[in-house]
Image (cartoon, rainbow, N blue to C red):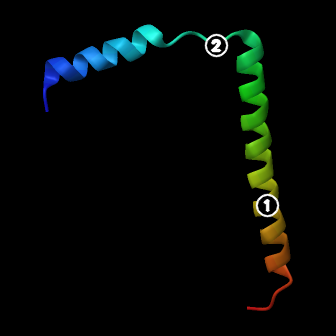
Amino acid sequence: MQVPKDLNSYVRVLKMASTPSWEEFSQIAKIAGAGILFVGLMGFTIAFIMQFIPA
């Protein structure tokens, strides 16, 4: 592992990175929120169905 070479690549990536616009951030937040709700709904549905299956 060559530390100076790695540091140069990290600095290059940070220079290329930029702050997202409000529209881009809003779209990402909506998609992430929809994913969280979907996974929660799936968990709730599975737990609800498991209540009716005898162990």
Outermost residue toward the left? 2
Question: Would residue 9 be found to the left or right of residue 51 on screen?
Answer: left
* Residue drawn at point x = 71 percent, y = 19 percent: 25
Question: Would residue 4 be found to the left or right of residue 42 on screen?
Answer: left
Q: Quadrant of residue 36?
A: top right
Q: Which mark is residue 20?
A: 2
* Residue drawn at point x = 72 percent, y = 36 percent: 32
Question: Would residue 55 be found to the left or right of residue 10 on screen?
Answer: right
Instruction: Give the amino acid type for the residue marked by disc 2 in the picture.
Output: Pro
Q: Please identify, in this view, whether the residue under mark 1 or under mark 2 is nearer the observer.
A: 2
Disc 1 marks which residue?
42
Quote the CA–CA distance across marks 1 and 2: 31 Å
Give how far across and how far down residue 47 sits, in percent: 78, 70
* Residue drawn at point x = 77 percent, y = 20 percent: 26
Q: Quadrant of residue 51?
A: bottom right
Question: Which of marks 2 and 1 precedes in the sequence?
Answer: 2
Return the residue nearer the eye: 51 or 21. 21
In the rendered image, the quadrant that contains the C terminus is: bottom right
Asked if residue 51 is positioned above or below residue 16 in the image, the reply reads: below
Outermost residue toward the bottom? 54
In the rendered image, the quadrant that contains the N terminus is: top left
Instruction: Give the amino acid type for the residue marked by disc 1 in the picture.
Output: Met
Question: Would residue 14 be found to the left or right of residue 44 on screen?
Answer: left
Sort mark 2 into few (<14), some (14-19) or many (20+) by Cα contacts within 10 Å.
few
Return the residue nearer the eye: 4 or 39. 4
